[in-house]
Amino acid sequence: MLTWPALIAVAIAGGCGAVCRYLLDRLVLGWTSGAVFPWGTWVVNVSGSLALGLLVGAGSAAWLGATLSTAITAGFLGAYTTFSTWMYESLRLIQEGSRLAGALNLAVSLISGLIAAGAGLWVGTALVASVA
């Protein structure tokens, strides 16, 4: 069960994650303006998957403590990554007649997110093994 300090830490980290997601999405949108594919959401979700894999692979709860690890993983990264925006953008592309782009958004985001999480898990685990 989470304590009040842990809940507050998750809430603060979640707010920071949401702001970081927005800023990175806008930055990528500036680089890719006019693109049909939602690159901002893709960059956010893949980088968040990589970060989560790294933290889990490195056993973040052991060296950060349960409260800080939960604040970062569930709070920050939970708000930073965005399943709902990914689904919304995919559906929007399909509804606007870009069926291929919508299907590619679903498939490419899923596959690259899994690869990023797996790579992060592998690197995080290797880092811990090299230190031990």
Image (spheres, rainbow, N blue to C red):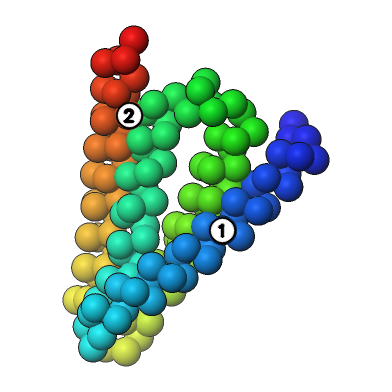
In the image, residue 127 lies at what x, y percent? 29, 23
Which picture quadrant has residue 54?
top left
Q: Which residue lies at the image location 26% right of the left edge and 29% below the top edge?
A: 122
Q: Is residue 20 toward the left or the right of residue 15 in the image?
A: left
Q: Nearer the viewer, residue 27 or 37?
A: 27
Q: Which residue lies at the image location 80% right of the left edge and 40% below the top edge?
A: 4
**Residue 61 in view (yes/no):** yes
In front: mark 1 or mark 2? 1
Label 2: which residue?
124
Q: Which mark is residue 16?
A: 1
Q: Which quarter shows the C terminus? A: top left
Q: Nearer the viewer, residue 93 or 5?
A: 5
In the image, residue 48 lies at what x, y percent? 39, 51
Q: How many other residues sit within 10 Å of disc 2, few (<14), some (14-19) or many (≥20)?
A: many
Q: How many other residues sit within 10 Å of disc 1, few (<14), some (14-19) or many (≥20)?
A: some
Tag 2: residue type? Answer: Gly
Q: Is residue 38 toward the left or the right of residue 26 in the image?
A: left
In the image, residue 31 lies at what x, y percent? 24, 78
Q: Element under label 1?
A: helix
